[in-house]
Amino acid sequence: MRDYIQTEGAYVNLLYYNTNQVNIGSSKTNKDINGTFDLGTDENRPMHVSILVDGDRVVVYLDKTKLADTILFMPTDAKNFYISGPMKYQNGAKVLISNLKIAKFKNS
């Protein structure tokens, strides 16, 4: 699992330990988008995350705020999805995921 969390390929990192840092990027396309989003208010409450993939382009939203709309994949890249959390949690913390939906992008 450690190989997957070394930011190989396209990635979206929410860094709660900094309370506001979000990294979106790709090692394949040499993109690195560093931004901020108040993650501290999302502790112990649901956060809506949307990751839309259309070909090589990725659009990322957190609670309906667009954080990225950019090319993150090379045309031949596989588009695999995984979620990882900290290896150790403190103070009895847990990550819960619900209402996960994977759907085909519809062109209009």
Image (tube, rainbow, N blue to C red):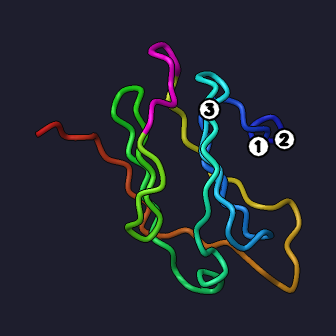
Q: Are marks 1 and 2 in contact (CB under 8 Å)?
A: yes
**What element does badge 3 sit on?**
strand
Point out the residue furthest to the top here.
76
Residue occupying the point 61% across, 38% down: 25
Q: Which residues are magenta?
A: 70-77
Residue flagged by tag 2: what amino acid is it? Arg
Query: At which x and y percent is residue 65?
Result: 41, 65
Query: At which x and y percent is residue 24?
Result: 60, 45
Residue occupying the point 80% across, 70% down: 17
Distance (Cα) linking label 3 and label 1: 13 Å
**What element does badge 1 sit on?**
loop
Crowding around mark 3 (Cα neighbors within 10 Å: few <14, some 14 to 19, many 20+) is many
Mark before the other along the chain sequence, 3 or 1? 1
Query: At which x and y percent is residue 10?
Result: 59, 35
Q: Could you tell me what secondary structure mostly forms the magenta stretch?
A: loop
Q: Which mark is residue 26?
A: 3
Image depth: mark 2 or mark 3 in front: 3
User: Does residue 56 show up magenta in the picture?
Assistant: no
Crowding around mark 1 (Cα neighbors within 10 Å: few <14, some 14 to 19, many 20+) is some
Residue flagged by tag 3: what amino acid is it? Ser
Residue located beneath label 2 in the image = 2
Residue flagged by tag 1: what amino acid is it? Ile
Residue 90 location, quadrant: bottom right
Q: Are marks 3 and 1 in contact (CB under 8 Å)?
A: no
**What element does badge 2 sit on?**
loop
